[in-house]
Amino acid sequence: MIIFTHPACLEHDTGPEHPECADRLRVVLESLREAHGDLDWRQAPLAKLGELHRVHDHALVEAVMDGDFDGHRMLDPDTVVSPKSRLAALRAAGAGVAAVDAVMNGPDTIAFCAVRPPGHHATPQAAMGFCLFNNIAIAAAYACEQYGLSRVAVIDFDVHHGNGTQAIFWDEPRVAYFSSHQSDLYPHTGAPREHGSGNIHNVLLPPGSGGFRFRNVWEDQLLPDVASFRPQLVLVSAGFDAHMHDPLADLMLEAEDFAWLSGRLKQIAAQHAGGRLVSMLEGGYSLDALRECSVAHVAALR
């Protein structure tokens, strides 16, 4: 198993008191090095402009790439950039591309990208929800174009719906999107009736839902749909903000629940995709929960 990361991802400065801070990634890296230091650790490359433009408009790419200013600049009420944010965003997106190359070409078939900023809220036109570029979407589009894949599954268990990923692949039958997320929560998208071209699968979890409901939703509804899709590659938006200690949401999951789903996704990848699975860090704003969940997630995948 491979871990992709880069020190530049720690240089994305969102300002004081912002929940999406460098400490998030710092505790993940510290915990993973302690628990899984024997894995193959690699530095994430810079994403290329052409890889970004597959899923994002030129105007958005230019806005994120502009580092000619001092201090902080707001791209939306929640999303901040600083002069070094562009390099962090390029490394985060580049990690997903490099991970796809790694698992497609072997011998390792599983990779985890410990990067920030997160990505799944970024739409074709806009950075939003702490996200600059949509890392998982860039990886999925790259896999389709570079390797000619026709069935790429994106699994998203972040507590917030990945509206950007859904929007990017709304009419793209080569990519299927599967998400569980809390109802009545930012960004207020992801209703079960949102189907795209039949490739979008959303399930809502009411506030207060715990591991029992989470596991049932995936076991009874989403995982059978993933298996029926027979993915050639499994991509995971691994957000850990559905944890019971997360300050930005109201679900009640524990690390064991994320580990359970991670193990089931590994089984599906083994059955249909030659074991090929790439996971990318998304949300999670309790540092203690991030430590515990990231270690459990990687342990279930390795």
Image (cartoon, helix red, strand yellow):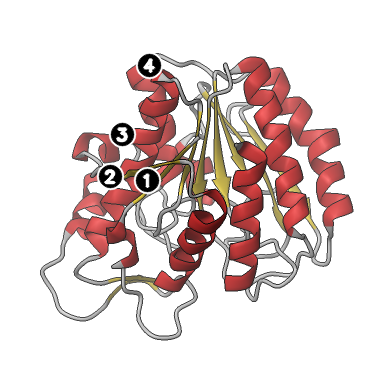
**Label 3 vs label 4, nearer the camera:** 4
Contact check, label 2 and label 1, Cβ < 8 Å: yes
The image position of residue 249, as x and y in percent, is 68, 69
Position above or below: 109 against 46: above
Q: CA distance from mark 3 to mark 1?
A: 9 Å
Pointer 2 or 1: first along the chain: 2
Contact check, label 1 and label 4, Cβ < 8 Å: no
Q: Secondary structure at mark 2?
A: loop
Q: Nearer the viewer, residue 86 or 102?
A: 102
Callout 4, which amino acid?
Tyr
Pointer 3 or 1: first along the chain: 3
**Label 2 vs label 4, nearer the camera:** 4
Read off the residue under disc 4.
147
Read off the residue under disc 1.
124
Disc number for residue 57: 2
* Mark 3 burial class by Cα count in 10 Å: few <14, some 14-19, many 20+: some
Residue situated furthest front in the rendering = 38
Q: CA distance from mark 1 to mark 4?
A: 22 Å
Disc number for residue 54: 3
Say which quarter of the image contains residue 105. Answer: top left
